[in-house]
């Protein structure tokens, strides 16, 4: 018989031991992130429950404290606060011309006098008489040098038959001369 040549070995060659391959580093990292996300989810769930409990406790405490206050007293105190605030507003806007008249008394020269006093938001208007044009110029200089009045304007000069000079004057006064609150500061 003819020997047949075969390339398949009749006995097995050296057996290599099978080594089980573990998880790769990427799989391990994924597993760690998965476990961390689960822990974080459970932690947030329990923290949410804790916060809801705290909210309920604080709401109950707030209701207890509100019951201890007298609602009538609170309403009365709110009315008192409104009254005090409106009184303060009234004082801040109160016009007290006495300081303006004191200013005019102190800053009017002896050779001039004023009459027909008029005050509105735009300023003060008065008519006046001076002994001469020189006295009128001196009065104008006194007013213009004062820091308490601004925009001083003398007009309508008229020499009267008795030798006196009639005139009109307009100016705006600083708030400290006009308003009560500004004058008390």
Image: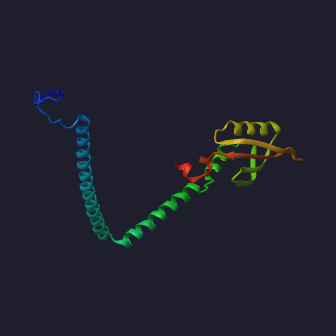
Q: How many marks?
A: 0
Q: Nearer the viewer, residue 84 or 111?
A: 84
Looking at this view, name the residue that lies furthest to the bottom: 72
Q: Nearer the viewer, residue 45 or 100?
A: 45
For the N terminus, which image quadrant? Answer: top left
Q: Position of residue 171 (x, y in %)?
A: 72, 45
Q: What residue sits 10% from the left and 27% below the top?
A: 14
- Residue 109 visible in the current orientation: no
71 relative to 43 in the view: left or right:
right
In x, y percent, where is residue 155?
A: 82, 44
Residue at the far front in the pictured view: 1
Q: Is residue 149 visible?
A: yes
Q: Position of residue 174 (x, y in %)?
A: 63, 45
Q: Residue at x 77, y 42 (%)?
A: 153
Where in the figure is residue 179, as x and y percent of width and height?
59, 52
Q: Quadrant of residue 94?
A: bottom right
Specify whether 23 is left or right of 79. left
Vertical comparison of 149 with 82: above or below: above
- Depth check: give the residue in front, 157 or 75: 75
Q: Residue at x 43, y 66 (%)?
A: 78
Query: What's the image's color scheme?
Result: rainbow
């Amino acid at each position: 018989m003819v020997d047949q040549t075969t390339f398949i070995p009749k006995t097995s060659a050296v057996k290599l031991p099978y080594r089980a391959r573990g998880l790769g580093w990427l799989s391990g990292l994924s597993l760690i992130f998965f476990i961390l996300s689960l822990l974080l989810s459970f932690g947030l769930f329990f923290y949410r429950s804790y916060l809801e409990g705290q909210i309920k406790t604080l709401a109950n405490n707030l209701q207890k404290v509100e019951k201890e206050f007298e609602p009538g007293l609170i309403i009365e105190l709110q009315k008192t606060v409104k009254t005090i605030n409106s009184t303060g507003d009234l004082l801040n806007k109160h016009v007290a011309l006495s300081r303006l008249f004191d200013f005019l008394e102190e800053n009017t020269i002896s050779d001039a006098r004023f009459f027909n006093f008029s005050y509105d938001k735009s300023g003060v208007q008065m008519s006046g008489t001076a002994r001469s044009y020189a006295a009128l110029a001196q009065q104008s200089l006194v007013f213009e040098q004062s820091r308490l009045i601004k925009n001083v304007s003398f007009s309508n000069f008229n020499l009267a038959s008795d030798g006196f000079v009639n005139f009109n004057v307009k100016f705006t006064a600083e708030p400290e001369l006009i308003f009560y609150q500004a004058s008390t500061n």
